Amino acid sequence: MASQTVADYLLDRLRQWGVEDVFAFPGDGINGILAAFGKAENRPRFIQSRHEEMSAFEAVGYAKFTGRVGVCMATSGPGAIHLLNGLYDAKLDRVPVVAIVGQTARTAMGGAYQQEVDLLSLYKDVASDYIQMVTVPEQLPNVLDRAIRIAVGKRAPTAIVIPSDVQELEYSAPSHAFKMVPSSLGVQWPSIQPDDQAIRQAAELLNQGSKVAMLIGHGARDAAAEVRAVADLLGAGVAKALLGKDSLPDDLPYVTGSIGLLGTRPSYEMMTDCDTLLTVGSSFPYTQFMPEPGQARGVQIDIDPGLIGMRYPYEVNIVSDAASALRALIPHLVRKEDRGWREDIEAKVGRWWETMHDEAMVEANPINPMRLFSELSDRLPDDAIITADSGSAANWYARQLKFRGDVRGSLSGNLATMGPGVPYAIGAKFGNPGRPVIAFAGDGAMQMNGLAELITIQRYWRDWADPRLIVAILHNDDLNQVTWEMRAMGGAPAFRESQSLPDVDYAGFASLLGLRGIRVTDPDELGAAWENALAADVPTVLDVRTDPDIPPIPPHSTLEQAMNTAKAMIKGDSSRWGVIKEGIKTKAQEFIPHHDQQTP
């Protein structure tokens, strides 16, 4: 019987940790591990992307939508470098990912050898919670176990570097000897219980408030029932940070939706009017969308002591698991009998959803991008998983999609990098093969990397119990978000040499791969296109011709931003008349009397 190598043991240990998928790209720096995959009959599965950055994004998507650790792997030198952007996405969104990377042989280190990069220095920041090189077989169990535990415990990326020659050494377990470090599998995580006195202080403060606003993030996702109970007792409205969009359904009448530049008017107005703020599981960074200092008294609940007491001058800061803290808080809360504040919030939320529908129906040339999202919102399966790329797709994801049931959704929240929409969806699909997954991406993101990852979808889709993976493309031949940022923030017209994109037949490319490609140029065909895609027995690309002149107007846009946009138009923006026309029509929907109002 052949001896077990370090690489053999690595895969065996990953299996014992329950790791089923490794998102990776091959290279000679991990040849020993690749050989071990062959001997292990591809267990865990080696999921081959088209680029190492996509492997990292797929691991992030897998982790976000399963709650389990995501594992990615790359060769030495350039492969390890390519992982960085995806790992920074994990770091900033606090997602557990373990990166396993190769390195040149120990005998060549320090010799300016091909592809030799100082990986410990390179990864020092992105994997600051744990980065280690395995130089002898006895090290491996402890290093791998710690990397997994720390990634999950701190919700952070960690990294392991294994030189190519070490991978091929015969495995030898750590012995019962001096300077050996034995290790063990598994971990039982506690629920972090709140301090009793802090709970009483928080309840006293919240009971005194008459206009309570709640802000929840992804950290509240496993406390949805408790959030509902507290919101009911306090008569509160609930706003959601972008990464917390799936923490509470949008069809609850008091859920005001997203907050911030991509947020809703009800969230903005609730924060400007409230006298009390309860923040749960969120470190939303944009303080200008929080209450004015001194306006409201505040309580924050977060499991991470490093993020507590930030963003607002809270009076009570509670380090705790969200569900545990809210359960402890509920018996001390007095139900507010005056429901005027809540009723006003619900009326504004109802009007907002009407406004979103009306804005989506504004005529455009040829298709209003908001309508692409709105038409799906009415047809969204209760078990769907949604990913969105950065850019204008994030605007409409935040505002137009009404999450119901157990719908999950995410995007690159804090890094806001381009390109994760499609690989997130692939990672989500491997983690949830029985659920429909929908990715929204701009044509810029598709040309950056999404087109290549359609090949990955083509390769693996038959492995999924539910074949539905839909990629909806906002096809406007423009890097639209940057175009609007230049207009609104800098008062500069769009610089076409930087913003214009070559026209690509995305539906045709999908069809060439054997996927379904649906081209949509008529807004009245969108509903049927979504229904066809949601009923398909093969992954589908929706190639939707959208109007780049539809402005992503914040519902609380400032006079300065409006003036800058006007200045850009005056300076000769080539789209100025289309922008002005569409902007007026879109913004007007907020002021047209709605279904529950009489025309004066």
Image (spheres, rainbow, N blue to C red):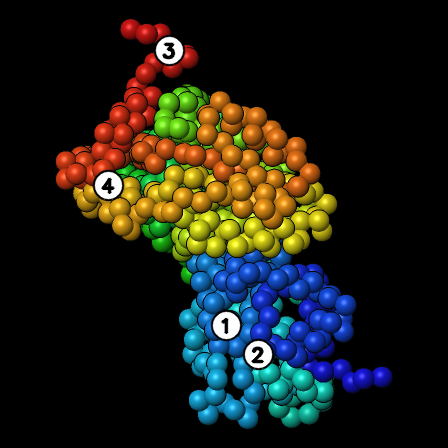
Q: Is residue 275 visible?
A: no
- Label 4 to label 1, Cα distance in Å? 38 Å
Q: Residue 153: image x %, image y %?
A: 56, 63
Give residue 342's quadrant in the image: top left
* Front disc: 2 or 3: 2
520 is higher (above) or lower (below) than 47: above
Q: Residue 87: image x %, image y %?
A: 48, 63
The amino acid pointed to by label 2 is Gly
Q: Say what secondary structure mark 3 lies in.
A: loop
Q: Which residue is mark 4?
A: 488
Q: Earlier in the sequence, mark 2 or mark 4?
A: 2
The amino acid pointed to by label 3 is Gln
| The N terminus lies in quadrant | bottom right
Q: Which residue is mark 3?
A: 597
* Label drawn at residue 237: none
Q: Which residue is mark 1?
A: 80
- Label 4 to label 3, Cα distance in Å? 32 Å
Residue in front for this viewpoint, 174 or 522: 522
Q: Which residue is mark 2?
A: 29
Tell me which residue sits at (61%, 40%) in the image.
516
* Front disc: 2 or 4: 2
Q: Residue 538: image x %, image y %?
A: 66, 41
Q: Say what secondary structure mark 1 lies in.
A: helix
Contact? badges 2 and 3 (CB < 8 Å): no
Q: Is 260 displayed left or right of 402 in the figure? A: left
Q: Say what secondary structure mark 4 lies in.
A: helix
Residue in front for this viewpoint, 174 or 515: 515
Contact? badges 2 and 1 (CB < 8 Å): yes
Tell me which residue sits at (32%, 16%) in the image.
592
